[in-house]
Image (cartoon, rainbow, N blue to C red):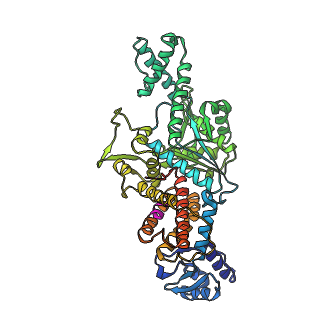
């Protein structure tokens, strides 16, 4: 109905040769109608008239059978009272489309790459990875549901100094098991997973792997730790379309050729024996070294090559989700994109803010089990995948958040994921008791204000999904599904669903089935699978 009202208003003002965006919003107060528009205020400066006069002119031009009444209120709002038939038409649409309700094609023809998590295969995933993973995967689901061609990508940092340190760390722990005492390398990795890998090698080879070169320990470490990371992410309901290896990028794009291309475009100079990228002339506030005095490459070079590769793949939008510690990295990366002749506006870098784990009102910094940072796997074991995904999707990415362990585990209405899940489970329980028997062409019994409120919220779902996709804000889905669950719980308290009247019962069952489908579809977009009974 909102789209219809927008089109009606557009047709009216087109008489004056005006083509501007028309806003129609759902009224918060039923006494002000079902929908309202501020178009008269927007047109005041164009028409050189008072908003009230413009609003009255628009009102007089509208004649539509679905609009019961139009009121004009100061300072120029146009309030629309409409027939409720569209809500019942939409309910039948929900029942027909099921898992596809809310799907659209607004992103048709747009090819999007979303890279997220991309943790170095030198350890295991922590809370920051959990937040970035929930956001990236939820955004990918929402955009794919909205018609975008989405590629979820993980960039595997399997080359460079950190991987050398990984191999040396495993080798050092392995030598200890062979009775050879050796100092860990500077910048080495001390996690328990390194000791576990060394033990695995020792159990298979005894001391025979002492003859192996460093490459053996590096390759084994990358393989084992990457598999562990991907397994943890799969448990977290994240699977990728593409894994891109830094090592393969270095093979495909000679880093020196990339630097030569930057040089030809006028963005390279040499100083103090090093080769510098002149990105201060583009977006950055300072220049950065690409080749050090000793001839080694900085980590920025393969990252430039990697994004050069992304652009060659023909994406219309490239989204990188990085930790807040990469704040200074964004300008130099965008500078490199422009310096290589690509459109920097296609690249969007999102920085996720810090997460604090809170229990009993106090910040939890260390795992009780290991004494180290809390891992994704430990969080899942503690609160479950549903709670983890819901809570991380609940907040805008650019805000710091506290993850309250007590609340996430609480089996009460104070826990939002429990509250929403309970609405779904409650509907499942009712529908098991009394199945739907036929479709309804005309609804008669659904005429209470609370019923209209529920139906209106269900009707809003496709628009919320579109907005979440266009604005890249998964938390809009979380806010929406909580509001829908609240309306359903209120409805359940006020309205008897199973009655002696078969037709009335059937109408109410159709209503709650529509709510069930909508809740499921909304939660699925943020990676939450609601239980059918609680």
Viewer-closest of 297 and 357: 357
Residue under the point 52% across and 41% down: 117
Which quadrant does the N terminus fall into?
Answer: bottom right
On screen, residue 69 above or below 454: below
Residue under the point 66% across and 78% down: 18
- Looking at the picture, how far across and down is residue 109, in whole percent? 70, 55
* Total count of labels: 0
- Residue 482 in magenta stretch: yes
- Give, as a single range, the part of the protein colored magenta: 481-485
On screen, residue 232 above or below 49: above
Quarter residue 462 falls in: bottom right
On screen, residue 478 above or below 295: below
Residue under the point 36% across and 32% down: 370
Quarter residue 275 falls in: top right
Viewer-closest of 513 and 112: 513
Q: Is residue 148 left or right of residue 419?
A: right
Q: Is residue 266 visible?
A: no
Q: Is residue 3 left or right of residue 362?
A: right
Residue under the point 62% across and 55% down: 145
- Looking at the picture, how far across and down is residue 427, in whole percent? 49, 60
On screen, residue 218 above or below 205: below
Q: Is residue 489 left or right of residue 143?
A: left
- Looking at the picture, how far across and down is residue 55, in whole percent? 57, 85
- Residue 152 in magenta stretch: no
Viewer-closest of 500 and 509: 500
Q: Main secondary structure of the magenta part?
A: helix
- Looking at the picture, how far across and down is residue 387, in whole percent? 43, 49
Q: Is residue 330 visible?
A: yes
């Amino acid at each position: 109905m909102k789209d219809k009202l927008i089109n009606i208003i557009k047709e009216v003002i087109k008489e004056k040769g005006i083509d501007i965006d028309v806003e129609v919003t759902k009224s918060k107060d039923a006494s002000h109608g079902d929908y309202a528009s501020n178009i008269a205020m927007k047109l005041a400066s164009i028409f050189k008239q008072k908003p009230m006069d413009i609003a009255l002119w628009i009102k007089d031009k509208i004649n539509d059978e679905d609009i019961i009444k139009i009121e004009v209120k100061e300072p120029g709002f146009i309030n629309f009272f409409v027939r409720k038939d569209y809500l019942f038409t939409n309910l039948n649409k929900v029942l027909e489309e099921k898992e596809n309700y809310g799907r659209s094609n607004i992103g048709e023809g747009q090819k999007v790459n979303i890279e997220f998590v991309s943790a170095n295969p030198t350890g295991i995933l922590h809370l920051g990875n959990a937040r970035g993973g929930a956001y990236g995967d939820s955004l990918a689901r929402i955009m794919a549901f909205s018609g975008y061609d989405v590629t979820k990508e993980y960039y595997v940092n399997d080359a460079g100094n950190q991987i050398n340190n990984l191999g040396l760390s495993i080798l050092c722990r392995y030598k200890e098991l062979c009775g050879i005492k050796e100092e860990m390398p500077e910048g080495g990795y001390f996690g328990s997973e390194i000791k576990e890998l060394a033990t695995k090698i020792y159990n298979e080879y005894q001391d025979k792997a002492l003859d192996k070169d460093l490459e053996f320990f590096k390759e084994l470490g990358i393989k084992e730790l990457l598999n562990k990371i991907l397994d943890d992410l799969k448990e977290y309901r994240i699977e990728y379309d593409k894994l891109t290896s830094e090592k393969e990028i270095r093979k495909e794009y000679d880093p020196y050729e990339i630097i030569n291309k930057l040089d030809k475009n006028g963005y390279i100079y040499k100083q103090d024996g090093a080769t510098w990228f002149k990105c201060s002339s583009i977006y950055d506030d300072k220049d950065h070294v690409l080749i050090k005095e000793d001839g080694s490459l900085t980590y920025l070079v393969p990252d430039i090559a990697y994004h050069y590769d992304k652009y060659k793949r023909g994406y219309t939008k490239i989204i990188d989700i990085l930790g807040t510690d990469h704040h200074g990295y964004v300008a130099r990366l965008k500078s490199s994109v422009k310096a290589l002749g690509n459109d920097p506006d296609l690249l969007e870098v999102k920085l996720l803010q810090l997460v604090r784990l809170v229990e009993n009102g106090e910040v939890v910094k260390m795992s009780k089990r290991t004494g180290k940072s809390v891992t994704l796997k430990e969080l899942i074991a503690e609160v479950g995948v549903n709670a983890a995904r819901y809570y991380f999707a609940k907040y805008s990415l650019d805000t710091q958040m506290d993850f309250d362990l007590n609340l996430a585990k609480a089996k009460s209405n104070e826990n939002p994921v429990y509250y929403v899940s309970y609405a779904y489970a409650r509907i499942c329980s009712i529908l098991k008791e009394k199945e739907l028997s036929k479709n309804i062409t005309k609804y008669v019994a659904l005429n209470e204000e609370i019923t209209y409120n529920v139906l209106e919220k269900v009707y809003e779902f496709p628009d919320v999904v579109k907005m979440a996709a266009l604005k890249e804000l998964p938390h809009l889905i979380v806010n929406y599904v909580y509001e829908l669950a609240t309306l359903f719980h209120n409805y359940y308290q006020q309205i008897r669903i199973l009655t002696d009247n078969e037709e009335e019962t059937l109408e109410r069952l159709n209503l709650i089935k529509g709510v069930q489908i909508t809740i499921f579809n909304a939660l699925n977009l943020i990676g939450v699978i609601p239980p059918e009974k609680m």
